[in-house]
């Protein structure tokens, strides 16, 4: 009798239980009541990883007031965790399947030749290689247990679970980007650089023509140590101190021909 093949193709199981692991005081997203443990959630999710799949389960939480039940991996629960514990959650959930964040990270640095189609082909190759390695391991055991002279038997092998298509990978990436929307807004409007340089001039304002002529007397350019112009401000007077106050950073002035240097190490999350 040949051994079953399923033990050779087992995948890891990840159990997400923030309430029992870290004793959070979670509240109900509907009524604001206190949530308590209500056993395990019956649905098990299949998560796409770089070299295969793994399964993920979670706990069930029940409100003590309205008795509504919420899964431990819902957005309402993840939003109540601090950032350190929230980053421990490994996947982005969709309606049927889920995707590990390590796979989504490969989509963030998309350059020429590094597209979602190439990532899909790479995942198919790695999944196939992992499945073939497990298949060879199982067949080698069967070869050692084969009795000489015995009739050959039909070997039943589990099929490899297919990798989702390119459109699904892009949709998962969009879902992950939506969870980082506030962070993305902050990056777009963040002051980059360790040193902010303010330079005032009247030469550019003299080139204004049409209806904008003579509407501004000074132009102030804000740049960093890399030579990148972050913003330009047109004013009717020299308002360097007001612009510096707008950036809300620690300022030290090098009063050399109206050229100021501003430390911006604390301005990484300050919006324009």
Image (cartoon, rainbow, N blue to C red):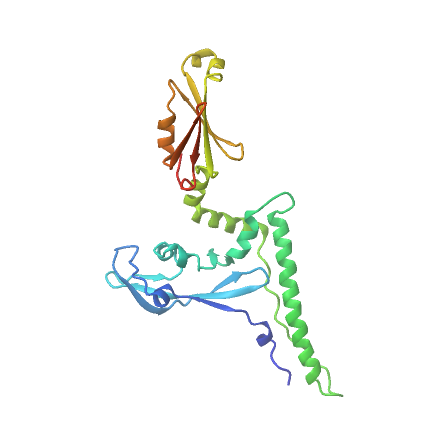
Left or right of 255? Residue 123 is right
Outermost residue to the right:
149
Between 41 and 99, the residue placed more toward the observer is 99
**Is residue 44 at all visible to an observer of this figure?**
no
Rendered residue at 25%/59% (across/down): 33
**Is residue 265 at all visible to an observer of this figure?**
yes
Please state the horizontal and vertical placement of residue 53, each as a whole percent of the image.
55, 64
Rendered residue at 30%/55% (across/down): 29
Rendered image quadrant of residue 244? top left
Rendered image quadrant of residue 237? top left
Location of the C terminus by quadrant is top left
Left or right of 4? Residue 237 is left
Rendered residue at 52%/69% (across/down): 12
Location of the N terminus by quadrant is bottom right
Between 102 and 201, the residue placed more toward the observer is 201
Between 220 and 11, the residue placed more toward the observer is 220
Considering only vertical position in the picture, is 221 above or below 161?
A: above
Outermost residue to the left:
65
Please state the horizontal and vertical placement of residue 72, each as a whole percent of the image.
38, 62
Considering only vertical position in the picture, is 260 above or below 26?
A: above
Rendered residue at 37%/63% (across/down): 18
Please state the horizontal and vertical placement of residue 156, each as a whole percent of the image.
64, 75
Rendered image quadrant of residue 186? top left
Please state the horizontal and vertical placement of residue 261, each as a whole percent of the image.
44, 32
Left or right of 170? Residue 114 is right
């Amino acid at each position: 009798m040949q051994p079953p093949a399923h033990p050779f193709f087992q995948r890891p199981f990840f159990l997400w239980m923030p309430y029992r692991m870290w004793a959070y005081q979670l509240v109900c997203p509907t009524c604001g009541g206190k949530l308590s443990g209500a056993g395990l959630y019956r649905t098990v999710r299949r998560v796409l990883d770089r070299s295969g799949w793994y399964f993920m389960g979670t706990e069930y939480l029940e409100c003590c007031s309205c008795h509504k039940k919420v899964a431990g991996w819902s957005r309402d629960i993840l939003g109540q965790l601090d950032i350190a514990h929230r980053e421990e959650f490994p996947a982005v959930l969709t309606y049927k399947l889920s995707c590990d964040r390590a796979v989504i990270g490969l989509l963030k640095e998309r350059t020429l030749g590094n597209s979602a189609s190439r990532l899909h082909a790479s995942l198919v190759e790695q999944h196939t290689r992992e499945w073939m390695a497990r298949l060879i391991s199982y067949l080698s055991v069967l070869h050692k247990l084969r009795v000489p002279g015995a009739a050959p038997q039909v070997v039943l092998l589990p099929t490899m679970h297919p990798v989702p298509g390119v459109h699904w990978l892009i949709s998962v990436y969009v879902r992950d980007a939506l969870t980082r929307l506030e962070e993305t807004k902050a990056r777009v409007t963040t002051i980059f650089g360790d040193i902010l340089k303010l330079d005032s001039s009247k030469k550019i304002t003299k080139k204004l023509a049409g209806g904008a002529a003579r509407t501004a007397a000074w132009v102030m350019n804000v740049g960093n140590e890399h030579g990148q112009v972050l913003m330009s401000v047109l004013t009717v007077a020299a308002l360097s101190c007001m612009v510096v106050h707008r950036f809300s950073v620690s300022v030290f002035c090098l009063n050399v021909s109206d050229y100021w240097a501003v430390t911006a190490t604390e301005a990484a999350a300050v919006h324009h």
